[in-house]
Amino acid sequence: MRVGSGRGAGFRVDRNGRLGGLGAKVARRLREGPYGERVLIGFRRDLAVPFPGPRPNVPISLRALRPDDVAALFPAADGTAAERERADVAWRLGMVGRRTLMSRAMVAVDETTGRPCHIQWLTEGYSDVIRTAAALPALSLDEGLLESAYTPNAYRGMGIMSAVTARMAEFAAGCGMRYVVAFIDQRNIASLRGAQRAGLSPWQIETCTQYAFGLLRRVRFAPIGDGFAVAGEGLGSPSP
């Protein structure tokens, strides 16, 4: 759901004693440019209100992530997007192991083939360092954050993401949460619509602004304006 992992890339020293990660870090800074702004739409669902989740085009079941799921979820044929998601999973599992990220990954399995076809994370909390670096909202004790949803190319267009999101919300309710929230890039129309089909409603706007090639960042959260609708549905765009 949420676009981007917010990982901080550390330096690594290769066999020749060089800082192998330095070049990659400089390249990322240059790609960000001297100024940039990103807008995400925050969605929320009250889990006390029943909602019939949508049905995907293939039968699915939900279970915890297994180590052998990674190859099927992020095949090399899916290109750089799959590579980024694979790295994100490795980072998240490391942070969970260090107890700086309270999160769990759930995987949807195509019941006709037994193949993993979607991954999504339910996060209950994180350290202040991760929250600041990733521009994440502060979560209440009764809130869970749905994030880092990914569907392999072969399973896109089948309604899987929205079906899994609805089931993840029910899973969160079973864990004692009252609300789930998700933040989605305003340009990701498919995910915005998928969140709404899963019963989440537009709630907040998050504006992330960076200056000086990412050295300075500012994050603002604001209530959503009246009359908001996903682009293409006839009601216009989010108000600033």
Image (cartoon, rainbow, N blue to C red):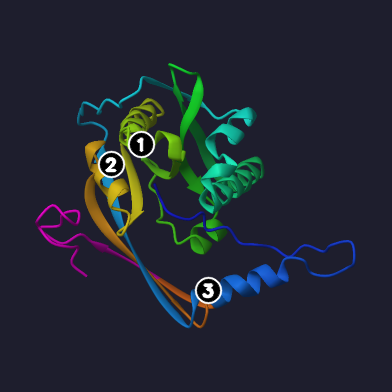
**Considering only order in the chain, which callout, 2 or 3, is on the residue closer to the N terminus?**
3
The x, y position of residue 77, in whole percent, is: 55, 43
Residue 133 showing in the rendered view:
yes
Question: What's the magenta region?
Answer: 219-240
Q: Main secondary structure of the magenta part?
A: loop
**Residue 224: within the magenta?**
yes
Residues packed near mark 2 inside 10 Å, few (<14), some (14 to 19) or many (20 plus): many
Residue 151 showing in the rendered view:
no
Q: Write down the residue under mark 3.
A: 31
Quadrant in the picture for residue 69:
top right
The x, y position of residue 150, in whole percent, is: 45, 42
Residues packed near mark 3 inside 10 Å, few (<14), some (14 to 19) or many (20 plus): few
Is 209 displayed left or right of 33 in the figure? Answer: left
Q: Do residues under tags 2 and 1 come within 8 Å of each other at their CB atoms?
A: yes
Q: Write down the residue under mark 1.
A: 161
Q: Write down the residue under mark 2.
A: 194
Q: Secondary structure at mark 1?
A: helix
Quadrant in the picture for residue 231:
bottom left
Residues packed near mark 1 inside 10 Å, few (<14), some (14 to 19) or many (20 plus): many
Q: Check the image and report above or below for 166 versus 1.
A: above
Residue occupying image coordinates x 90% and y 66%: 16
